[in-house]
Image (cartoon, rainbow, N blue to C red):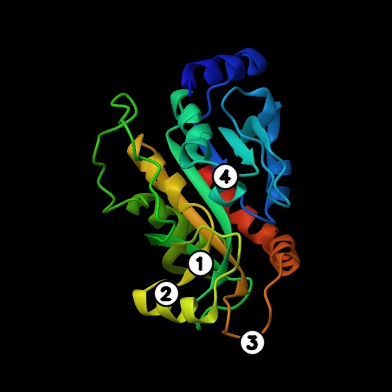
Amino acid sequence: MDYNVACDVINDISGGFAPEIVIVLGSGLAGFAEKVEPVSVIHYDLIPGFSVSTAPYHNGRLILGTLEGKRVACMDGRLHLYEGLELEQVVFPLRVLRKLGAERIILTNASGGINTSFSVGDIMLINDHINFQGRNPLIGKNDDEMGPRFPDMTYAYDPEFRILASKCAENLGIDIKNGVYLSCTGPSYETPAEIRAFRILGADAVGMSTVPEVIAAVHCGYKVLAFSLITNMAAGITGNRLTMEEVAETGKRRSLVLGSLVSEVIKNC
């Protein structure tokens, strides 16, 4: 994939807009995109190398504009391994945006709560992750211009960025949790037995995204921040069946709170 060709197309459409911060929106959080004052709205299928979002509630648009005085690139719809994509396709957009100048990335996702002290609607600040997707986006020949062959993941979720997010939450009166996010491939939800195993491994929430993006983002030099919105308790905890509708409903109900927190972080970073 040619990052430069994608950059050229985005530059031609946007008039050379250079983002500072990338925002990746997860399931049920698409409404946040309306907070951005747009310069350009570009559908993914117009950008060479970008794959088209097929997941429910993912609009597949790149919104370039301003938010809280910062130049942002908002991915209104992310890409997932379960859509039949290769991980190189999943992380391609954020690499392109890094080449356009973005230095920070804020990722959001909808996830299932594994930690039984969590409640539906809680916001979890991710402090680490466990990769259960069985794949890594850096497999293959390394692009030395993008990053090192063996990037360190000790501080994948930037400590200073997380401190800022915690302070912003406190200022807004938002109670946030901290925890470890575990990523599976999906698209099936996890089994109760898997959730029990994941709890033993130290996971607090589970989902089907984010980890490949974080690995690629660290590799190419982003400062990374990520939030999980607990849209349901994971399989076996309540005994209820899991549905996409529940995820979307909680996302819709709590997106304003998470959106206000993300906006506050952007304002202060």
Q: Distance between the residues labelled 4 and 3?
A: 31 Å
Q: Which residue is drawn at 26% across and 54% down?
A: 154
Whichever of labels 2 and 4 marks the residue nearer the N terminus, that label is: 4
Q: How far apart are marks 2 and 4 (CA)?
A: 25 Å
Task: Tell me if mark 3 has few (under 14), some (14-19) or many (20+) residues whose alpha carbon lies within 10 angstroms of its own.
Answer: few
Q: Mark 3 points at which residue?
A: 239
Using the image, tell me which numbered label, if any, was put on residue 24: 4
Q: In this view, does 241 lie to the left or right of 111?
A: right
**Residues marked 2 and 1 touching at CB (< 8 Å):** yes
Q: Name the residue under label 1.
A: 206
Whichever of labels 4 and 1 marks the residue nearer the N terminus, that label is: 4
Whichever of labels 3 and 2 marks the residue nearer the N terminus, that label is: 2
**Viewer-closest of 124 and 135:** 135
Q: Residue at x 54, y 58 (%)?
A: 208
Q: Name the residue under label 2.
A: 198
Q: Residue at x 74, y 60 (%)?
A: 252
Residue that lies at the very extreme toward the front in this rendered image: 84
Judge whether residue 174 can be spotted in this image.
Answer: no
Q: Which amino acid does label 1 sit on?
A: Val
Instruction: Check the image and report above or below for 11 versus 77.
Output: above
Q: How far apart are marks 4 and 1 (CA)?
A: 17 Å
